[in-house]
Image (cartoon, rainbow, N blue to C red):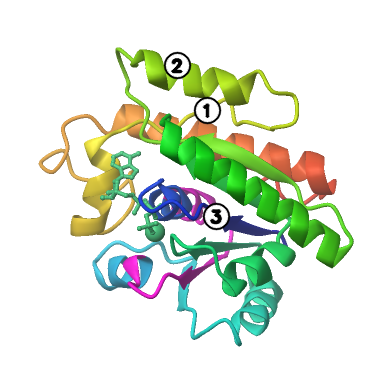
Amino acid sequence: MPVITFANSKGGSGKTTSALLLACELATERPVTIIDADPRRPITKWATLPGKPERLTVISNESEKTILEEIEEASAVSTFVIVDLEGTASRLMSYAISQSDLVIVPMKEQTQDATAAVDVVREIHRDMKAARRKIPYSILFTQSKVVAKSRTARFVASQFRENPDFHVFQTEIFDRDAFSALFSVGGTVRTLSKDTVRTTEEAVKNVQSYTHEVVKRLKDAMGIKNADAA
Ligand SMILES: Nc1ncnc2c1ncn2[C@@H]1O[C@H](COP(=O)(O)OP(=O)(O)OP(=O)(O)O)[C@@H](O)[C@H]1O
Ligand SMILES: [Mg+2]
């Protein structure tokens, strides 16, 4: 079953948030396992809060020595396996990438994130050589301003979007309180109360179109028939 890894060695690029949003949305219909491979355990901590979807299983990665088995075991029981990596390049990152059907490289529309994203893409290409197979990857812009993007943000985005070497998701994950609030109150964007965050409808729509695009990308990349959950 498809394995989706979130990788960018730049800290704070939006890996954990985008991984959790995707996992929860997919888990509305299918069994999903998310492997928390960040030693600070952000997703494991989120899972102790109320509101985790029933179909979502959270596993805390033990070490780089166990990641391959953890992915294999999760793939046997879940329709989707999602791996959230920590913000440093490591052997664990390469192992996870080598097992992936899709690597998502989240990045803010900032120069430092762009440089790190290009490094990750180079790493994915090395891992492809090692694994002797193609590993599809996509850039995902995160924490984008809903209104009034800066000139830098527009420039960085265009550098990726206009480069045919990169696949970039059309949908960007906007900077929204709803997304950061999940880590303090638990649950998903669909279960957030209006008392916590004023407008959740736009956040839900954003997550739906993001999930839809990821599933389509997986289908295109793998030709799988059972990835039509979203
Ligand atoms: N779309 C978003 N809207 C609002 N806040 C966000 C969004 N994405 C991320 N954040 C916030 O930005 C910070 C970094 O995000 P996140 O933890 O997802 O990044 P990361 O790439 O996983 O970081 P690390 O490399 O440290 O693991 C967090 O405080 C998170 O709540
Ligand atoms: Mg993280």
**Residue 23 placed where, x, y %?**
49, 55
Q: What stretch is highlighted in magenta?
A: 21-42
**Mark before the other along the chain sequence, 2 or 3:** 3
SS assignment at label 3:
loop
Q: In this view, does 212 lie to the left or right of 22?
A: right
Residue linked to disc 1? 171
Q: In this view, does 12 lie above or below 74?
A: above
Q: Which residue is drawn at 30% across and 15% down?
A: 147
Q: How would you rate the neighbour count of disc 2 (Cα within 10 Å): few for under 14, some for 14-19, many for 20 or more? A: few
Please tell me whether mark 1 or mark 3 is closer to you in this view.
Answer: 3
Q: Where is mark 3, residue-wise?
A: 7
| CB under 8 Å between discs 2 and 3 | no
Residue 228, compared with residue 59, is above or below; it is above
Q: How far apart are marks 1 and 3 (CA)?
A: 18 Å
In terms of depth relative to the viewer, which is nearer, 141 or 204?
Answer: 141
Magenta stretch: includes residue 230? no
- Please state which amino acid type lies under the numbered disc 2: Arg
What secondary structure is marked by label 2?
helix
Residue type indicated by callout 3: Ala
Q: Do the residues labelled 1 and 2 touch (CB within 8 Å)?
A: no
Task: Judge whether residue 3 can be spotted in this image.
Answer: yes
Q: How crowded is mark 1: few (under 14 residues within 10 Å), some or many (20 or more)?
A: some
Tag 1's secondary structure? loop
- Proximity of marks 1 and 3: CB atoms separated by less than 8 Å: no
C-alpha separation, residue under disc 2 versus residue under disc 3: 22 Å
Confirm whether residue 230 shows in the render.
no
Disc on res. 123: none
Residue name at image x 49 percent, y 85 percent: 62
- Decide which of tag 1 and tag 2 comes sooner along the chain: 2
Residue visible at 33% across and 72% down? 40
